[in-house]
Image (cartoon, helix red, strand yellow):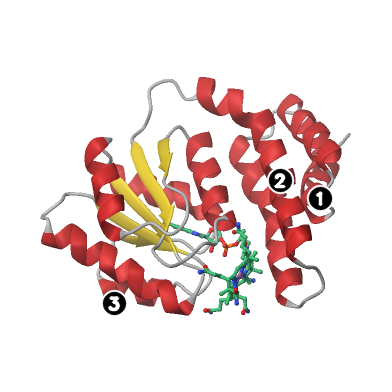
Amino acid sequence: MSNESIMADLKKSVETWDIKLAQSATQAAIDAKIPIGTIIGDGLGKGMETIGVRFDKAEIYLPQVVAASKTMEAALAVLKPLMESGAGAMKGTVIMGTVEGDIHEIGKNVCCAMLRGAGYNVIDLGPDVTAMDFIDAAEENEAQVIGGSALMSTTLESQRDIVNTVKEVGAPYKTIFGGAPCSQEWVDEIGGDGYSETANEIIELVNKLVA
Ligand code: B12
């Protein structure tokens, strides 16, 4: 099987919430020595992007979104042993979460998987996380970076809260942000340290910040 068709199967498996295909395509990708970042970012993650667009257009509904994210999780479970063993010494610790007031998790989960695949210790605080909880977790885990995902224009302000709280407590953490309504301009405005539009670019972003 060619690498192109493996990549196509990875994307298709999430788009059609086909858990068996996701697991077999992920194993085929591992056997073909396709890098973890490519499997997640250009395969499974691309399928999840299609799901987001189709849900937006009301072509599919919540049960299908949930089924697609379960498919993605099943594929990530196949990758897990590689993520944990391959990295050797951890490159650093990143606290990730979806900001206060926001329950969207799929994109944040893709980012967590990419960072784990690249050798980072990722503490995922889940959805609806307050600024102070991000900072407490960073302190507890001696993290270098805090990443906040926001999927709604109304919760972008919670990203600003994170930057302000980091400054108020005088903490050394770098802050990175993303999510559909977020942009480089917004992150510049609130004084954050980094933005990436997709999970593909998050590794380079974090590498630069912890260097
Ligand atoms: C799936 C979905 C849901 C699911 C979430 C399931 C889950 N467990 O996550 C459910 C059905 C639960 C849901 C609920 C709601 N949703 Co909704 N949802 C979506 C949808 C369709 C897709 C989001 C998604 O998963 N995309 C796929 C992922 C892979 O992409 P992503 O999240 O953008 O992430 C990528 C990048 O942004 C980046 N990234 C993401 N996070 C981070 C973080 C960092 C640090 C970095 C660097 C990068 C980064 O990397 C990711 C991978 O490449 C979007 C529409 C859309 N197209 O975005 C609406 C959308 C976000 N939802 C919306 C709304 C309004 C809601 C609700 C309020 C609906 C309601 N009335 O109840 C509730 C939210 C309640 C709340 N308090 O949060 C609106 C927001 C409008 C706005 N601009 O404010 C949207 C845009 C739909 C719309 N057009 O109206 N939703």
- Which residue is denoted by mark 1 in the rendering? 17
Mark 1 or 2 closer to N-term?
Answer: 1
Q: Are marks 1 and 2 in contact (CB under 8 Å)?
A: yes
Q: Classify 10 Å Cα crowding around label 3: few (below 14), some (14-19), many (20 and above).
A: few
- The spot of residue 131 in percent (x, y) is 29, 59
Q: CA distance from mark 1 to mark 2?
A: 8 Å
Residue that label 3 marks: 189
Where's residue 3, x and y in %? 80, 39
Residue 41 higher or lower than 159, as above or below: above
Tell me the amino acid under the disc marked 3: Glu
**Eyeballing the image, is 174 above or below 71?**
below
Q: Tell us which disc is closer to us: 3 or 2.
A: 2
Mark closest to the chain's N terminus, 3 or 1? 1
Q: State the residue in front, 128 or 55.
A: 128
Residue at (46% x, 79% y) in the render: 153
Q: Which residue is mark 2?
A: 70
Q: Amino acid at mark 2?
A: Lys
| CA distance separating discs 3 and 1 | 38 Å
Task: Please state if 65 lies on the left or on the right of 188 as rendered.
Answer: right
Q: Residue at x 40, y 40 (%)?
A: 123
The picture quadrant for ligand 1 comes to bottom right
Of the 4 image quadrants, the one containing the N terminus is top right
Q: Residue at x 71, y 37 (%)?
A: 74
